[in-house]
Amino acid sequence: MLKTHSCGELTAEEADKDVVLTGWVDSLRVQGKIAFLILRDREGITQCFLNPNLTNEFKDLSKESVVLVAGKVKNRPENQIRRELTTGEIELGVDKIEILSRAETPLPIEIEEETTTHLDKRLDFRFLDVRRNRIKSIFKVRAKIYQYSVEFFTQEGFINIQTPKLTQSGVESGAEEFKLDYFGKPASLSQSPQVYKQMMVASGLEKVFEIGPVFRAEKSHTTRHLTEFTGVDFEMGFVKDEHDVMDVVEKYIKFVLEKVKRECKEELKMLDIKLKVPKEIPRLEMSEVKKLLAEKGKEIPADDDLDPEGEKMISKIVEEKYGSELLFVINFPWSVRPFYHMRPKGIVTGTKSFDLIYRGVELSTGAQREHRLEMLDKQAKEKGINLKEMTFYRDIFRFGCPPHGGAGLGLDRITEQLLGLKNIREAILLPRDVERLTP
Ligand code: AMO
């Protein structure tokens, strides 16, 4: 490696040692013959002062240039310790600077922690935006959420699978597909691993999960929709009912919250976030939710879905009533759910389904699935779908398929809500939406 240490590592213990650091020029201040260079890398910030014979040559070094500096670590006197710097106890007396890459000026966006640059512009230059520590923190936490998700499902006995993203067609009737030409045949980008996760339960793998890209040609200009997002999907066999599935979702989200709270303290501090882990997540019937909303003046017809305003309102009501920022809404009307959701015995207007809502935004949808072929054929027909044309989906239920259920969550939405971000685009490095296909 070019360097001996990172900028976050040096302490008084390294005093008098010769070290080499690399990083970006956060700032350069020249005072007479002395120049102070604040050097930044992923791990922190170190103050360096240049040997006076270097000052003249490097006094015009532009901000954000990438440099290598070599020199001796010096202890700072007790009354000069700079607590705001990661390595405030020491500074580096630099004898040698090498410019590895000079940054052009002016920079296209501000890189200060507090910036007024518009999100769109920041996303155009996302790699510069990520140089801000606040933004780095978001993606460090996101990476942890991903890691905890793999850890959770693996330890719960789920098998990690990867399913095709190039598909013939999906089963998410509500979600639009991106069409493409597959060697002359019509195809589409996967809008959910739904078909395959059910198929793999029937394959005998019994419990599977997948964390992967999901594509939706949704023309929604909202703060919570992307056209490409990362889905956290799971499916499990031999469930008694949808509550078995909800138990897994509940255990998962508490696991993630608990771990982030415990292991990402520095990032949460930087983002000014206090996390609450609920003891139990309330499960409210949709009819009960609609009653509570009606009491607050919002009427939603029995056959309709919750709208975003309704989700926000019910979240608030539940937080006041039960002290939980999370809630399950259960038993959605059949009219707003896909054909593959099971209906409760003898009730054709309901479904054995649920949504998980966190701080006013839907994080997950799940259900017990209909695994009895004759019922599935009937339900598909009611929704105007000809299941006979979806041979390979129908086949899943022909040769021994356990009762099963599962759910899908969005990694981007989990990150957005957990970190209190105002827009889902803040939670993904390079968002794709109706307007954006670059960088
Ligand atoms: P659904 O369509 O509700 O369900 O998607 C599951 C979860 O994925 C996230 N999500 C999105 N995130 C960002 N941008 C979008 N456009 C977007 N659409 C959905 C949400 C949502 O809760 N097959 C079912 C899941 C199942 O039943 O297992 C499905 O795809 O967090």
Image (cartoon, rainbow, N blue to C red):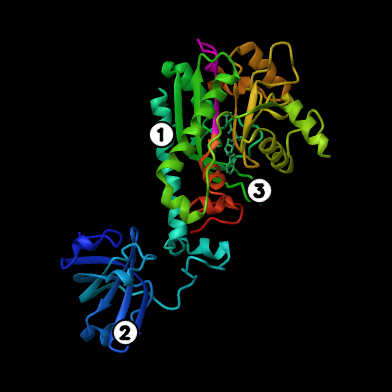
Circle 2 — which element?
Answer: loop
Q: Quadrant of residue 294?
A: top right
Of circles 2 and 3, the one toward us is 2
Q: Is residue 438 left or right of residue 262?
A: right
Residue 425, horizontal then vertical, whole percent: 55, 53
Indicate if the residue with disc 2 has its beta carbon within 8 Å of ligand 1. Answer: no
Q: Is residue 280 left or right of residue 303?
A: left
Please give the range of residues in magenta.
Answer: 395-408
Residue 193, horizontal then vertical, whole percent: 51, 31
Q: Is residue 333 left or right of residue 418?
A: right
Of circles 2 and 1, the one toward us is 2
- Disc 1 designates what residue? 150
Query: Going by the picture, which residue comes out furthest to the left?
Result: 17
Alpha-carbon distance for marks 2 and 3?
50 Å
Q: Nearer the viewer, residue 6 or 13?
A: 13
Q: Residues within 10 Å of mark 2 (few under 14, many from 20)?
A: some
Indicate if the residue with disc 1 has its beta carbon within 8 Å of ligand 1. Answer: no
The quadrant of the rendering that contains the N terminus is bottom left
- Residue 399 colored magenta? yes
Image marks 1 and 3: residues in contact by CB distance under 8 Å: no
Q: Residue at x 49, y 35 (%)?
A: 232
Number of numbered tags placed on the structure image = 3
- Residue 60 colored magenta? no
Quadrant of the rendered image holding ligand 1 = top right
Q: Nearer the viewer, residue 12 or 241?
A: 12
Circle on res. 223: none
Circle on res. 59: 2
Q: Residues within 10 Å of mark 3 (few under 14, many from 20)?
A: few
Position above or below: 74 against 127 = below
Circle 3 — which element?
Answer: loop
Q: Is residue 359 visible?
A: yes
Circle on res. 219: 3
